[in-house]
Image (tube, helix red, strand yellow):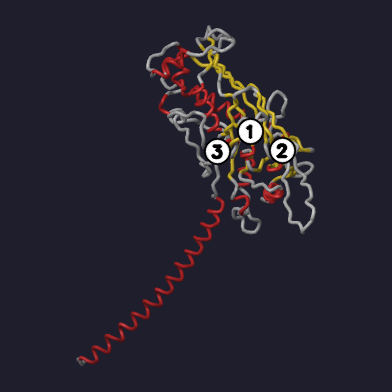
Amino acid sequence: MSLTEKEKKDLADEVKSQISDEIKFETKDKVEQINTLIKEKLELIDVVGKRCDTIETKMGRLPIDSGTLEADLVPENKEENSQPLIFQDDKGIEHKALRFNEKLFEGKAEDFSVGKILRARILGDLKGLNEFETKAAGEGIGGAGGWLISEQVSAKIIDLARNLACVQKAGAVTMPMETPELRLVKLAGDPSAMFIAEHGELQESDWSLEPINLKAMTIGVLVRASLDILEDAANSGNQLSNAMAAAIALAVDRVALLGDGVNEPRGLDHCEGINKISMGTNGAALTDYDKFSEAIEDVADHNGEATAVIFSPRTFFTLDRLKAATTNQPLIPPQSFIDLKKYVTNQIGIADTQGTCTTASKAFIGDFKNVLYGIRKNIEVEITKQGGTKTFAKCEALIRARMRLDVAVLRENHFTRIAGIKV
C-alpha cells in the first residue's frame, strides 16, 4: 500500500522527532559525563598547582655549565624597586648597597673572560687574549708576591659567587667596602606614634639605634690543577673560576646563616634578637606547616614581612612528601607558606644535637634584605708550581684566592629560626 504525500511527511516528521529526542538524551548524558570529568581534573590541577608554587632549589653545589655561567650574570629574581639602597656611616659618608639584581661589575659580560685570564696567568701564555685580558693577566703584585686582580676582574668573580649564594638570592644586599672597617647604624626597635587630646602628653617610644661594625675578614679557597689539562683544554680556566666562585658562594651562605662570630662573621643562628621556635626538647618530625606559619607570624608581630625560607634538602623534600591524613593526597600548604620563596642549601646540616636527637636540622624564615654583606672589592690570587706536596713533581699548580668580607643583620627580629627538625 502506497503512502500519500501527507502520510510520508507525517512519518518523516515522527522519525526526525524520535532521532532528535535520542540525540538530545545521549548528548545530555555525554555532557554530564564530560562535565564530571572536567570537574575532577580541575580539582586535581588545583591540588597540584598549589603545591607547584614558585620553588627555587639550589642544592648546594649543583653541576655548573662552564660555557654559560660566566656570561650569565642576570639574576633570577629581579626586583621592581629601582630606588638605590643608601647607608650612611658614622662620618656622614653615604654608601650604596647592591640588591641581588645589581652587579659590582659594571661592564659587559663579553668584555673579558675571567677564566681565560686565570689560565693565561698560570701558564704564562697570553695567546688568544684581548687587550684588556692581556693587561689584567700581567698587572698587580700583592704584598706577599701574589697576583692582585684588578677591580673589574674582582667584581666579576664576586658577582659569579653572588649569583650562586642562596642568601643573596633570598634578598641579601651587598655593600662594597672602601676601607677595612665600616661603622653603620641599625634600628633596634620601632618607634610608636599616638593621638593625644588637647594638652595631652606624648609618651616616649621604646626604640634605639645600635651600631653595626663591619670588619672585613679573610675568606679563601685553595685548589690544585693539572698543568696538562690547563694547556690542552681551552675552557679549563672557566671551570677553575666557576669552581672557585661556587666554593666562595657556599662559604658565604654558611656564615650568613650559621657563622659563630669567632674568626668568621656572625650569622643568623647566633643572633640573640631573632625569633626562635623549637620542635621540642628532643626535636620532632614535620607533619604539617604549622611551625612555618608560626615563624611567619613572629616576623609579622615585629612589623616585618617574611619573604623567603632557607632550609636543608632533607627538610624541603620532607615537606614535599607530606600527605593529607584522610585522602593520602599531597598536603596543601597554607597561603603564608606558598607565598614564601624557597631556597635549599646543604650548608644547613642535618646532624645538630637537640636533647637526645643527633640528626636535627634548622630552617630560617624572614626578610633577607636585612642581611648585609660588606665586601672588599679586590681579590688576591697566588699561584705556585712548586709549593705544596709534590706539586712540582706532578706538573701541577696550586691556586689560592682570598678576599675579605663581613656580614651584618640589620633587623634581627625580622627573622625566625626553627630548630630541632628531624625525620
- Looking at the rendered structure, the kind of residue marked 3 is Pro
Q: Position of residue 381 (x, y in %)?
A: 54, 16
For residue 57, the mark is none
Residue 420 appears in the rendering? no
The residue identified by callout 3 is 84
The residues tagged by marks 3 and 1 sit, at their Cα atoms, a distance apart of 13 Å
| Quarter in which the N terminus is drawn | bottom left
Q: Residues within 10 Å of mark 2 (few under 14, many from 20)?
A: many
In the current view of this chain or complex, which residue is farthest to the front? Answer: 199
Tell me: residue 37, above or below residue 409.
below
- Looking at the rendered structure, the kind of residue marked 1 is Gln
Judged by depth in the image, the label closer to the viewer, 2 or 3, is 3
Tell me: residue 204, above or below residue 312.
below
Q: Residue at x 45, y 18 (%)?
A: 117
Tell me: residue 183, above or below residue 301.
above
Left/right of residue 184 with respect to residue 140 in the rendered view: right
The residues tagged by marks 1 and 2 sit, at their Cα atoms, a distance apart of 40 Å
Which element carries disc 2, helix, strand or loop?
Answer: strand
Residue 351 appears in the rendering? yes
Front residue of 143/240: it is: 143
The residue identified by callout 2 is 360
User: Counting residues from the N terminus, which is met first, the one under dot 2 or under dot 3?
Assistant: 3
The residue identified by callout 1 is 88
Q: Position of residue 120 (x, y in %)?
A: 44, 15
The residues tagged by marks 2 and 3 sit, at their Cα atoms, a distance apart of 40 Å
Q: Position of residue 207 (x, y in %)?
A: 75, 43
Q: Position of residue 247 (x, y in %)?
A: 57, 26
Front residue of 218/340: it is: 218
Left/right of residue 200 with respect to residue 342 in the rendered view: right
